[in-house]
Amino acid sequence: MTMGTDRGGPGESPPQGHDRGGPGGSPPQGHTDEVDFAVHPAAQLVPAAERERLLADPGFGKVFTDHMITAEWTAERGWHDAQLRGYGPLSLDPATQVLHYSQEIFEGLKAYRQETGPVVAFRPYANAARFNRSAARMAMPQLPEDAFVRALELLVTQDRDWVPGRPDHSLYLRPFMIATHVGLGVNQPSPSCRFLVIASPGGGYFHGGVRPVTVWLSEQYSRAAPGGTGAAKTGGNYAAAFAGQQQALDNGCDQVVWLDAVEHSWVEEMGGMNLFFVYGSGTDASIVTPALTGTLLPGVTRDALLTLAPDLGIPTEEGRISVADWRAGCASGEITEVFACGTAAVITPVGEVRGATGGWTVGDGTPGPVTTRLRDQLVGIQFGHLPDPYGWMHKIC
Ligand code: COI
Protein backbone atom coordinates (compact mmCIF):
# COMPACT_ATOMS: atom_id res chain seq x y z
CA MET A 1 0.00 0.00 0.00
CA THR A 2 1.23 3.49 -0.82
CA MET A 3 0.82 5.82 2.11
CA GLY A 4 -1.08 9.10 1.79
CA THR A 5 0.67 12.38 2.27
CA ASP A 6 -1.40 13.96 5.01
CA ARG A 7 -0.62 11.65 7.89
CA GLY A 8 -0.03 13.21 11.25
CA GLY A 9 1.32 9.84 12.36
CA PRO A 10 0.62 7.90 15.52
CA GLY A 11 0.32 10.15 18.52
CA GLU A 12 -0.54 13.03 16.20
CA SER A 13 2.05 15.23 17.84
CA PRO A 14 2.24 18.73 16.42
CA PRO A 15 4.53 18.45 13.39
CA GLN A 16 7.64 20.60 13.53
CA GLY A 17 9.60 22.52 10.96
CA HIS A 18 6.86 23.48 8.55
CA ASP A 19 7.34 26.21 6.01
CA ARG A 20 6.41 29.50 7.65
CA GLY A 21 5.84 33.03 6.44
CA GLY A 22 4.33 34.56 3.35
CA PRO A 23 3.28 33.11 0.02
CA GLY A 24 6.89 33.11 -1.15
CA GLY A 25 7.81 30.84 1.77
CA SER A 26 10.13 33.23 3.63
CA PRO A 27 8.75 34.88 6.77
CA PRO A 28 8.00 38.60 6.39
CA GLN A 29 10.42 40.89 8.19
CA GLY A 30 9.74 42.16 11.70
CA HIS A 31 7.38 39.53 13.08
CA THR A 32 7.52 36.18 14.79
CA ASP A 33 5.47 33.04 14.48
CA GLU A 34 3.71 33.86 17.76
CA VAL A 35 0.03 34.65 17.36
CA ASP A 36 -1.54 36.01 20.53
CA PHE A 37 -5.31 35.90 20.66
CA ALA A 38 -7.14 38.59 22.62
CA VAL A 39 -10.42 37.42 24.14
CA HIS A 40 -13.42 39.74 23.75
CA PRO A 41 -16.51 37.75 24.72
CA ALA A 42 -19.79 38.82 23.09
CA ALA A 43 -21.90 41.30 25.09
CA GLN A 44 -25.01 39.26 24.37
CA LEU A 45 -25.30 35.50 24.12
CA VAL A 46 -28.11 33.42 22.66
CA PRO A 47 -30.35 32.66 25.68
CA ALA A 48 -29.92 29.11 27.02
CA ALA A 49 -33.50 28.08 26.20
CA GLU A 50 -33.13 29.24 22.61
CA ARG A 51 -29.76 27.47 22.33
CA GLU A 52 -31.32 24.21 23.51
CA ARG A 53 -34.15 24.64 21.01
CA LEU A 54 -31.62 25.11 18.19
CA LEU A 55 -29.53 22.13 19.36
CA ALA A 56 -32.57 19.84 19.26
CA ASP A 57 -32.60 19.76 15.45
CA PRO A 58 -29.67 21.77 14.08
CA GLY A 59 -29.38 20.18 10.60
CA PHE A 60 -25.95 20.81 9.06
CA GLY A 61 -24.28 24.23 8.79
CA LYS A 62 -27.36 26.26 9.65
CA VAL A 63 -26.85 27.19 13.29
CA PHE A 64 -23.80 29.11 14.56
CA THR A 65 -22.37 29.61 18.01
CA ASP A 66 -21.97 32.89 19.93
CA HIS A 67 -18.35 33.58 18.98
CA MET A 68 -15.82 33.48 16.18
CA ILE A 69 -12.09 33.94 15.72
CA THR A 70 -10.51 36.53 13.45
CA ALA A 71 -6.85 37.33 12.78
CA GLU A 72 -5.26 39.67 10.25
CA TRP A 73 -2.16 39.13 8.15
CA THR A 74 -0.17 41.64 6.14
CA ALA A 75 3.10 41.14 4.33
CA GLU A 76 4.66 43.85 6.56
CA ARG A 77 3.33 42.80 9.96
CA GLY A 78 2.68 39.09 9.63
CA TRP A 79 -0.19 37.82 11.82
CA HIS A 80 -1.72 40.41 14.14
CA ASP A 81 -4.99 41.54 15.73
CA ALA A 82 -5.92 37.94 16.50
CA GLN A 83 -9.01 37.75 18.66
CA LEU A 84 -12.01 35.82 19.83
CA ARG A 85 -15.12 37.97 19.50
CA GLY A 86 -18.88 37.80 19.08
CA TYR A 87 -20.15 36.01 15.96
CA GLY A 88 -21.39 38.54 13.42
CA PRO A 89 -21.34 39.89 9.87
CA LEU A 90 -18.13 41.03 8.21
CA SER A 91 -17.79 44.45 6.67
CA LEU A 92 -15.87 44.18 3.39
CA ASP A 93 -15.20 46.73 0.66
CA PRO A 94 -17.05 45.55 -2.49
CA ALA A 95 -13.69 45.47 -4.32
CA THR A 96 -12.14 43.01 -1.83
CA GLN A 97 -10.04 40.43 -3.72
CA VAL A 98 -11.77 37.32 -2.35
CA LEU A 99 -15.15 38.49 -3.68
CA HIS A 100 -13.86 38.66 -7.26
CA TYR A 101 -11.04 36.16 -7.62
CA SER A 102 -11.93 33.58 -4.95
CA GLN A 103 -8.54 33.67 -3.29
CA GLU A 104 -9.62 31.73 -0.21
CA ILE A 105 -9.13 28.40 1.56
CA PHE A 106 -11.03 26.54 4.24
CA GLU A 107 -11.02 23.50 6.49
CA GLY A 108 -13.64 21.39 8.18
CA LEU A 109 -13.26 19.32 11.34
CA LYS A 110 -15.40 18.35 14.29
CA ALA A 111 -15.39 18.60 18.08
CA TYR A 112 -17.25 15.92 20.03
CA ARG A 113 -18.66 15.81 23.53
CA GLN A 114 -17.55 12.42 24.80
CA GLU A 115 -19.77 10.55 27.25
CA THR A 116 -17.09 10.67 29.94
CA GLY A 117 -17.08 14.48 29.86
CA PRO A 118 -14.29 15.98 27.76
CA VAL A 119 -14.77 17.85 24.52
CA VAL A 120 -12.27 16.61 21.95
CA ALA A 121 -11.37 17.44 18.35
CA PHE A 122 -10.42 14.90 15.68
CA ARG A 123 -6.87 15.31 14.34
CA PRO A 124 -6.73 19.13 14.34
CA TYR A 125 -3.03 19.14 13.42
CA ALA A 126 -3.82 17.16 10.25
CA ASN A 127 -6.24 19.94 9.27
CA ALA A 128 -3.69 22.60 10.24
CA ALA A 129 -1.11 20.98 7.95
CA ARG A 130 -3.56 20.69 5.06
CA PHE A 131 -4.62 24.31 5.60
CA ASN A 132 -1.03 25.37 5.03
CA ARG A 133 -0.70 23.17 1.95
CA SER A 134 -3.86 24.80 0.57
CA ALA A 135 -2.45 28.22 1.51
CA ALA A 136 0.76 27.53 -0.40
CA ARG A 137 -1.18 26.51 -3.53
CA MET A 138 -3.41 29.59 -3.30
CA ALA A 139 -0.44 31.94 -2.71
CA MET A 140 -1.63 32.79 0.79
CA PRO A 141 0.40 33.07 4.02
CA GLN A 142 1.25 30.12 6.24
CA LEU A 143 -0.45 30.08 9.64
CA PRO A 144 1.61 28.41 12.39
CA GLU A 145 -0.07 25.07 13.13
CA ASP A 146 -0.10 25.83 16.84
CA ALA A 147 -1.99 29.08 16.18
CA PHE A 148 -4.53 27.20 14.05
CA VAL A 149 -5.14 24.69 16.84
CA ARG A 150 -5.09 27.36 19.55
CA ALA A 151 -7.81 29.26 17.66
CA LEU A 152 -9.99 26.12 17.65
CA GLU A 153 -9.34 25.51 21.34
CA LEU A 154 -10.28 29.08 22.27
CA LEU A 155 -13.51 29.05 20.28
CA VAL A 156 -14.65 25.61 21.43
CA THR A 157 -13.82 26.38 25.06
CA GLN A 158 -15.68 29.69 24.94
CA ASP A 159 -18.71 28.10 23.21
CA ARG A 160 -18.52 24.80 25.07
CA ASP A 161 -22.27 24.91 25.80
CA TRP A 162 -22.89 24.67 22.05
CA VAL A 163 -21.13 21.31 21.70
CA PRO A 164 -24.05 18.91 21.22
CA GLY A 165 -24.54 15.99 23.57
CA ARG A 166 -26.93 14.04 21.36
CA PRO A 167 -25.78 10.80 19.71
CA ASP A 168 -24.03 11.42 16.37
CA HIS A 169 -24.18 15.21 16.83
CA SER A 170 -21.01 17.29 16.98
CA LEU A 171 -19.66 20.81 16.62
CA TYR A 172 -18.43 21.38 13.05
CA LEU A 173 -15.51 23.80 12.98
CA ARG A 174 -14.90 25.86 9.88
CA PRO A 175 -11.51 27.63 9.79
CA PHE A 176 -11.01 29.72 6.65
CA MET A 177 -8.81 32.41 5.19
CA ILE A 178 -9.77 35.14 2.72
CA ALA A 179 -7.79 37.59 0.62
CA THR A 180 -8.65 41.07 1.94
CA HIS A 181 -6.71 43.28 -0.47
CA VAL A 182 -8.99 45.90 -2.01
CA GLY A 183 -8.60 46.28 -5.76
CA LEU A 184 -9.51 44.61 -9.04
CA GLY A 185 -6.02 44.05 -10.42
CA VAL A 186 -4.82 40.47 -10.71
CA ASN A 187 -1.12 41.18 -10.83
CA GLN A 188 -0.28 39.75 -7.39
CA PRO A 189 -1.57 37.52 -4.60
CA SER A 190 -3.29 39.54 -1.91
CA PRO A 191 -0.75 41.25 0.40
CA SER A 192 -3.34 41.06 3.20
CA CYS A 193 -5.47 38.16 4.43
CA ARG A 194 -7.88 37.38 7.25
CA PHE A 195 -8.11 34.05 9.10
CA LEU A 196 -11.43 33.19 10.69
CA VAL A 197 -13.00 30.28 12.53
CA ILE A 198 -16.73 29.79 12.96
CA ALA A 199 -18.47 26.85 14.63
CA SER A 200 -21.74 25.14 13.84
CA PRO A 201 -23.46 22.44 15.91
CA GLY A 202 -24.87 19.78 13.65
CA GLY A 203 -26.37 16.36 13.22
CA GLY A 204 -26.17 14.24 10.10
CA TYR A 205 -24.94 15.83 6.87
CA PHE A 206 -27.41 14.00 4.66
CA HIS A 207 -31.09 14.27 5.37
CA GLY A 208 -32.47 10.89 6.48
CA GLY A 209 -29.39 9.63 8.35
CA VAL A 210 -27.00 6.95 7.07
CA ARG A 211 -28.78 5.81 3.93
CA PRO A 212 -27.20 4.80 0.63
CA VAL A 213 -26.91 7.61 -1.90
CA THR A 214 -27.46 7.42 -5.65
CA VAL A 215 -24.64 9.02 -7.62
CA TRP A 216 -24.42 10.63 -11.06
CA LEU A 217 -21.25 10.15 -13.14
CA SER A 218 -20.26 13.57 -14.45
CA GLU A 219 -18.96 13.01 -17.96
CA GLN A 220 -19.50 16.61 -19.10
CA TYR A 221 -17.76 18.57 -16.34
CA SER A 222 -14.45 18.06 -14.52
CA ARG A 223 -13.70 18.99 -10.94
CA ALA A 224 -9.94 19.29 -11.17
CA ALA A 225 -7.17 19.04 -13.76
CA PRO A 226 -3.46 18.20 -13.40
CA GLY A 227 -1.61 21.29 -12.19
CA GLY A 228 -4.84 22.83 -10.91
CA THR A 229 -6.19 23.29 -7.41
CA GLY A 230 -7.90 19.91 -6.87
CA ALA A 231 -5.74 18.98 -3.87
CA ALA A 232 -6.37 22.33 -2.16
CA LYS A 233 -9.43 22.97 -0.05
CA THR A 234 -10.43 26.17 -1.79
CA GLY A 235 -13.89 27.55 -2.46
CA GLY A 236 -13.39 27.70 -6.23
CA ASN A 237 -13.30 23.90 -6.45
CA TYR A 238 -16.71 23.77 -4.83
CA ALA A 239 -18.08 26.66 -6.92
CA ALA A 240 -17.06 24.84 -10.10
CA ALA A 241 -18.77 21.68 -8.82
CA PHE A 242 -22.27 23.09 -8.44
CA ALA A 243 -23.18 22.66 -12.13
CA GLY A 244 -22.30 18.96 -11.93
CA GLN A 245 -24.18 18.62 -8.65
CA GLN A 246 -27.21 20.27 -10.27
CA GLN A 247 -27.04 17.73 -13.12
CA ALA A 248 -26.96 14.96 -10.52
CA LEU A 249 -30.09 16.39 -8.89
CA ASP A 250 -31.77 16.85 -12.29
CA ASN A 251 -31.15 13.16 -12.96
CA GLY A 252 -32.70 12.10 -9.68
CA CYS A 253 -29.34 11.48 -7.96
CA ASP A 254 -28.09 12.70 -4.59
CA GLN A 255 -24.45 13.36 -5.44
CA VAL A 256 -22.11 13.83 -8.37
CA VAL A 257 -19.07 11.58 -8.97
CA TRP A 258 -16.06 13.26 -10.58
CA LEU A 259 -13.86 11.55 -13.14
CA ASP A 260 -10.34 12.52 -14.17
CA ALA A 261 -10.17 15.53 -16.49
CA VAL A 262 -7.90 13.92 -19.11
CA GLU A 263 -9.52 10.59 -20.02
CA HIS A 264 -12.87 11.04 -18.24
CA SER A 265 -12.69 7.43 -17.15
CA TRP A 266 -10.86 7.27 -13.79
CA VAL A 267 -12.97 7.76 -10.66
CA GLU A 268 -11.78 10.61 -8.43
CA GLU A 269 -14.26 11.88 -5.84
CA MET A 270 -17.93 12.07 -4.91
CA GLY A 271 -19.06 15.66 -4.33
CA GLY A 272 -16.74 16.89 -1.59
CA MET A 273 -15.89 13.37 -0.38
CA ASN A 274 -13.33 10.64 -1.13
CA LEU A 275 -14.49 7.23 -2.40
CA PHE A 276 -13.65 3.69 -1.29
CA PHE A 277 -14.39 0.42 -3.14
CA VAL A 278 -14.79 -2.81 -1.19
CA TYR A 279 -13.56 -5.90 -3.01
CA GLY A 280 -14.62 -9.34 -1.76
CA SER A 281 -16.41 -10.05 1.49
CA GLY A 282 -15.99 -11.52 4.96
CA THR A 283 -12.37 -12.23 5.86
CA ASP A 284 -11.39 -11.74 2.19
CA ALA A 285 -12.63 -8.14 2.02
CA SER A 286 -10.18 -5.39 1.07
CA ILE A 287 -10.66 -1.70 0.27
CA VAL A 288 -9.27 0.38 -2.58
CA THR A 289 -9.37 4.16 -2.88
CA PRO A 290 -8.23 6.39 -5.74
CA ALA A 291 -4.60 7.41 -5.21
CA LEU A 292 -3.75 11.05 -4.48
CA THR A 293 -2.67 12.19 -7.93
CA GLY A 294 -2.71 15.91 -7.16
CA THR A 295 -6.27 16.34 -8.43
CA LEU A 296 -7.93 14.77 -5.37
CA LEU A 297 -8.44 16.26 -1.95
CA PRO A 298 -6.29 14.38 0.61
CA GLY A 299 -9.10 13.75 3.08
CA VAL A 300 -8.35 13.38 6.78
CA THR A 301 -11.14 10.78 7.06
CA ARG A 302 -9.71 8.95 4.02
CA ASP A 303 -6.33 8.87 5.75
CA ALA A 304 -7.86 7.67 9.02
CA LEU A 305 -9.59 4.77 7.25
CA LEU A 306 -6.37 3.77 5.48
CA THR A 307 -4.79 3.62 8.94
CA LEU A 308 -7.48 1.80 10.89
CA ALA A 309 -8.75 -0.69 8.27
CA PRO A 310 -5.59 -2.89 8.35
CA ASP A 311 -5.94 -3.10 12.15
CA LEU A 312 -9.41 -4.56 11.56
CA GLY A 313 -7.92 -7.13 9.17
CA ILE A 314 -9.01 -5.24 6.06
CA PRO A 315 -6.11 -4.69 3.64
CA THR A 316 -6.02 -1.33 1.85
CA GLU A 317 -4.71 -0.11 -1.45
CA GLU A 318 -4.45 3.25 -3.18
CA GLY A 319 -4.90 2.76 -6.91
CA ARG A 320 -6.90 3.61 -10.01
CA ILE A 321 -10.50 2.54 -10.59
CA SER A 322 -12.16 3.24 -13.93
CA VAL A 323 -15.89 3.58 -14.49
CA ALA A 324 -15.65 0.37 -16.57
CA ASP A 325 -13.95 -1.44 -13.63
CA TRP A 326 -16.64 -0.18 -11.28
CA ARG A 327 -19.47 -1.36 -13.51
CA ALA A 328 -17.88 -4.73 -14.35
CA GLY A 329 -16.86 -5.29 -10.70
CA CYS A 330 -20.42 -4.77 -9.50
CA ALA A 331 -21.78 -7.03 -12.26
CA SER A 332 -19.36 -9.86 -11.40
CA GLY A 333 -19.79 -9.42 -7.65
CA GLU A 334 -16.07 -8.65 -7.20
CA ILE A 335 -16.95 -5.15 -5.90
CA THR A 336 -19.35 -5.72 -3.02
CA GLU A 337 -19.67 -2.23 -1.50
CA VAL A 338 -18.76 1.37 -2.28
CA PHE A 339 -18.76 4.24 0.18
CA ALA A 340 -17.77 7.89 0.35
CA CYS A 341 -16.03 9.49 3.32
CA GLY A 342 -15.46 13.00 4.59
CA THR A 343 -15.56 15.02 7.77
CA ALA A 344 -19.11 16.22 7.43
CA ALA A 345 -20.91 12.97 6.54
CA VAL A 346 -18.23 10.58 7.95
CA ILE A 347 -19.04 7.47 5.83
CA THR A 348 -21.90 7.32 3.34
CA PRO A 349 -22.76 4.15 1.40
CA VAL A 350 -23.22 4.41 -2.37
CA GLY A 351 -26.21 2.27 -3.42
CA GLU A 352 -26.69 3.08 -7.06
CA VAL A 353 -24.74 4.61 -9.95
CA ARG A 354 -26.26 6.42 -12.92
CA GLY A 355 -24.70 8.03 -15.98
CA ALA A 356 -25.47 9.07 -19.53
CA THR A 357 -25.15 5.44 -20.71
CA GLY A 358 -27.22 3.78 -18.00
CA GLY A 359 -26.70 2.66 -14.45
CA TRP A 360 -26.17 -0.16 -12.00
CA THR A 361 -26.64 -1.13 -8.37
CA VAL A 362 -23.77 -1.61 -5.94
CA GLY A 363 -24.15 -4.91 -4.07
CA ASP A 364 -27.78 -5.17 -3.06
CA GLY A 365 -28.04 -1.37 -2.76
CA THR A 366 -28.02 -1.38 1.06
CA PRO A 367 -25.16 -0.41 3.45
CA GLY A 368 -22.69 -3.31 3.44
CA PRO A 369 -20.95 -4.88 6.46
CA VAL A 370 -17.49 -3.44 5.71
CA THR A 371 -18.91 0.08 5.32
CA THR A 372 -20.85 -0.29 8.56
CA ARG A 373 -17.89 -1.75 10.47
CA LEU A 374 -15.49 0.99 9.40
CA ARG A 375 -18.05 3.67 10.24
CA ASP A 376 -18.76 2.19 13.66
CA GLN A 377 -15.04 1.96 14.40
CA LEU A 378 -14.26 5.53 13.39
CA VAL A 379 -17.31 7.05 15.08
CA GLY A 380 -16.60 4.92 18.16
CA ILE A 381 -13.12 6.43 18.45
CA GLN A 382 -14.42 9.96 17.84
CA PHE A 383 -17.15 9.76 20.48
CA GLY A 384 -14.90 7.93 22.95
CA HIS A 385 -16.85 4.66 22.95
CA LEU A 386 -13.76 2.85 21.65
CA PRO A 387 -10.07 3.23 22.55
CA ASP A 388 -8.03 5.67 20.45
CA PRO A 389 -4.79 3.77 19.73
CA TYR A 390 -3.66 6.41 17.22
CA GLY A 391 -3.79 9.45 19.53
CA TRP A 392 -6.21 11.13 17.14
CA MET A 393 -8.50 12.75 19.69
CA HIS A 394 -7.19 16.10 20.90
CA LYS A 395 -8.63 17.16 24.26
CA ILE A 396 -9.91 20.73 24.23
CA CYS A 397 -11.82 21.22 27.47
C1 COI B 1 -16.07 17.18 4.21
O1 COI B 1 -16.92 16.40 4.53
O2 COI B 1 -14.89 17.00 4.51
C2 COI B 1 -16.38 18.39 3.45
O3 COI B 1 -15.48 19.03 3.04
C3 COI B 1 -17.80 18.76 3.24
C4 COI B 1 -18.02 20.22 3.35
C5 COI B 1 -17.57 20.97 2.12
C6 COI B 1 -19.46 20.51 3.68
Image (cartoon, rainbow, N blue to C red):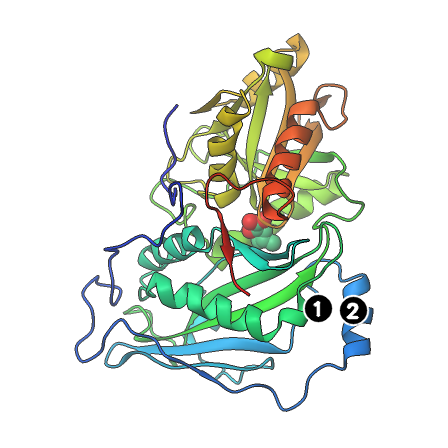
At 57% from the left and 24% from the top, the residue drawn is 277
Numbered circles on residues, count: 2
| Residue for point 77% across, 39% down | 252
Q: Position of residue 124 (x, y in %)?
A: 46, 55
Residue 7: image x %, image y %? 39, 42
Amino acid type of disc 2?
Leu
State left or right for residue 388 relative to residue 213: left
The image quarter in which residue 32 lies: bottom left
Residue 148 position (above or below residue 181): above
Q: Which residue is mark 1?
A: 63
In terms of depth relative to the viewer, which is nearer, 52 or 90?
A: 52
Tell me the quarter of the image containing the C terminus.
Answer: bottom right
Few, some or many residues within 10 Å of mark 1 (<14, 14–19, 20+): some
Question: In the image, residue 4 lies at what x, y percent?
Answer: 39, 35
Q: Residue 153 appears at what percent x and percent y?
A: 49, 67
Q: Judge whether residue 241 can be spotted in this image.
A: no
Q: SS of the residue at dot 2?
A: helix
Query: Which residue sits at x=25%, y=67%?
Result: 22
Q: Determine whether 302 is above or below 162 in the image.
A: above
Please say if the residues under marks 1 and 2 sit with CB atoms less than 8 Å apart.
yes
Name the residue located 63 percent from the left edge and 91 percent from the top edge: 43
Of pointers 1 and 2, the one earlier in the residue sequence: 2
Q: Which mark is residue 43?
A: none
Q: Which residue corresponds to mark 2?
A: 54
**Is 20 positioned to the left or the right of 279 in the image?**
left
Indicate the amino acid at tag 1: Val
Side (left or right) of 48 relative to 233: right
Q: Is residue 189 shown to the viewer in this render?
A: yes
